[in-house]
Image: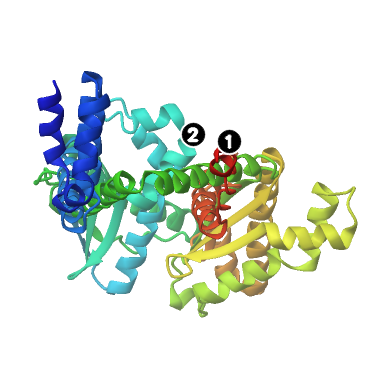
Amino acid sequence: MNRILLWATRLYPPRWRARYGEEFEALIQDAARSSDLCDILYGALIMQFRTGAAFLKFALTLTAAGALIAAAISFNSPRRYESSAIVQIAPAPGDTDDFARYYADTLKQQILSRGNLSALIRQPTLKLYSEDLQRLPLEDVVQQMRNRDIQVQPIAGNRLQISCTYTDKEKARRATQALASQFANGMPGMAQLRASAWERTLHRSDAPPAPQVRVVRSATLPAGSGIPDLALWISLGALAGALAAFTWRRPKPALRFAAFAALGGTLAFGISYLIPAHYTSSARVKIAAGYIPEQLAGFSPLPPRQEFEEIRNDLLGDENLARMVEQFFPDRPFEDARQRLRQAIKIEPANDYRTVEISFTGSDPRKTKQAVDHMVARAMESFVYRAKKQSRGNPALETIREAQLGPHLEVLDPASLPEDPASPDRLLFAAIGAPLGLLLALLVRRRPAAPSLAPALAI
C-alpha cells in the first residue's frame, strides 16, 4: 500500500516535491495508512490548482463549461415567438391623412383598452396566459400584454404593423390576427355610429365617411427558434464558471462573501415587510377630437397638449384637492392631507397627449380606486363645462357637443381595484441588500488570531 501512497505523491507540483518531498515520503513510510490515499490525492489536486498556470487553465475550463451549460439551459427555457400583420388605412374621399390617422388612433386606443384585452385573453379558442393568471391578477396580465407583448407601429404608406409576442407560435399568430381583424372590422362600426348620430342631431345624411381599413398582410406564423437572448445566457454561464473557479481556489473568502451577501439580502427582504404596503389604482381617458364641420361650427378645438394641461391643472387644483381631503381624509390636518394627495396623484400624458393616465397610490386599495373614480368624474365634468362655455350662443356647436360628435373625453380603462401592493418591491430590496452585504464583507476585516501560548508552555 505504501507504494501506491508514494506514487500518489508524484501528483504534487515539482516545486513542492523538491522542497517537501523527502520529508513527506518519510512520513508516509513511518505512519501512513491506506485510508490516507484520498487525503493525499485531494491535497495533490489542491496544490496543483494553486499554481498560476494550472489555475488559469482550470478557471478557463470552468468558464467554458459554465457557458456551455447555460447555452443548454437556454434551449430548454420558455421561448417567445413574434407574429405580425399589416393593415392599410385608406382616407375617405376628401379627407386628409391626418383625419385617417385620427380614426386609426381612436381604434387603437379602443382595441388596447383593458376591457378588450381582457376579453381577448379569456377567449376560449385562445386561452392566453393560463399560467400567469394562476399567480397574477387579470389587471397585471393585461398591463403586461399591453406594454410588453403587443406593438402597434405606424409604417410607411398609411400602414400599421401589429405584432404580438407569445410563448406559443400558433397562439401568437391567432392573437395577432384577432387584433388585425378588430382594426378592419371596427372602422365600419365607427362610421355607422357616427352617421346615426349625425342624422339624429344635425338632421343631415351627409356624414363624413370613415376611412377604409383592410388587412394587407395576414398574421404570419413566427419563424425561427424563439430562443431567448443566447449571448446573455452564455455570458451569465461564463461568469458563474469564473466564480466557481474562484470559490475552488479561495473557498473561505468565497464562502464568507456568499454568507454576507445572503445575510444582506435576507435582512433587506425582512425589512421590506416593516414598510407599510401601498396600492396603486389607475385609469385611462382619451381626449377624442371628434369631427366638427367647419361650415357649421366655425371654431377649432384646443390642441391635445393644451387640453391635457387643463385637465391636469384642474385635478391638482386647490378646489379638487379640498374635495378629496374632505371625502377621503377628513380626520387628517388639511395641509398635511393636501400635501400627501399631491404626492399620491399622478397625471401623465400618453400617445402624444391624446391619452391621459390617472393614478393614485395609497395604503387602502378601495380608497385608491374611489380616488381615481372621483378624478375621472371630475375630469369629465370639467371637460363638459369648458365645452359648454365654448359652445354657448352657437346652436350647432351645442348640438354637436350633446351628441359627442365634437371633442369629448372617453374612458378607455376605468379605475382598477388593486390586489397586490405596488410598493415596497421586496425582491428589489433583496437585490439591493445582497451587494450591500458584499460591501460589508470587504469593509469588515477579520481579526488576526491571538498568538498561542502552547509552544512556550511545552518547553
Q: From the image, which quarter does the N terminus lie in?
A: top left
Residue 207 in view: no
Residue density around tag 1, few if under 14, some if 14–19, many if 20 or more, within 10 Å: some
* Front residue of 45 and 69: 45
Of the image marks 1 and 2, the number of the one nearer the N terminus: 2
Q: Position of residue 408 (x, y in %)?
A: 54, 61
Q: Which quarter of the figure has residue 95? A: bottom left
Q: Secondary structure at mark 1?
A: loop
Q: Which residue is mark 2?
A: 137
Which residue does the image show at 43% across and 67% down from the upper left? 291
Q: Are marks 1 and 2 in contact (CB under 8 Å)?
A: yes
Q: From the image, which quarter does the C terminus lie in?
A: top right
The amino acid on which the numbered mark 2 sits, given as a three-letter code, is Pro
* Front residue of 90 and 204: 90
Which residue does the image show at 14% across and 24% down from the upper left? 2
In the image, residue 384 sits, relative to residue 310, either above or below, namely: above
* Front residue of 273 and 453: 453
Q: Position of residue 384 (x, y in %)?
A: 64, 62
Which residue does the image show at 44% across and 78% down from the upper left? 295
Q: Which residue is mark 1?
A: 419
* Front residue of 55 and 329: 55
Residue density around tag 2, few if under 14, some if 14–19, many if 20 or more, within 10 Å: few
Residue 368 in view: yes
Which residue does the image show at 46% across and 54% down from the upper left? 197
Q: How is the image coloured?
A: rainbow
Q: Secondary structure at mark 2?
A: loop
Q: CA distance from mark 1 to mark 2?
A: 7 Å
The amino acid on which the numbered mark 1 sits, given as a three-letter code, is Glu
Q: Position of residue 261 (x, y in %)?
A: 49, 47
Horizontal side, residue 161 vs residue 455: left or right: left
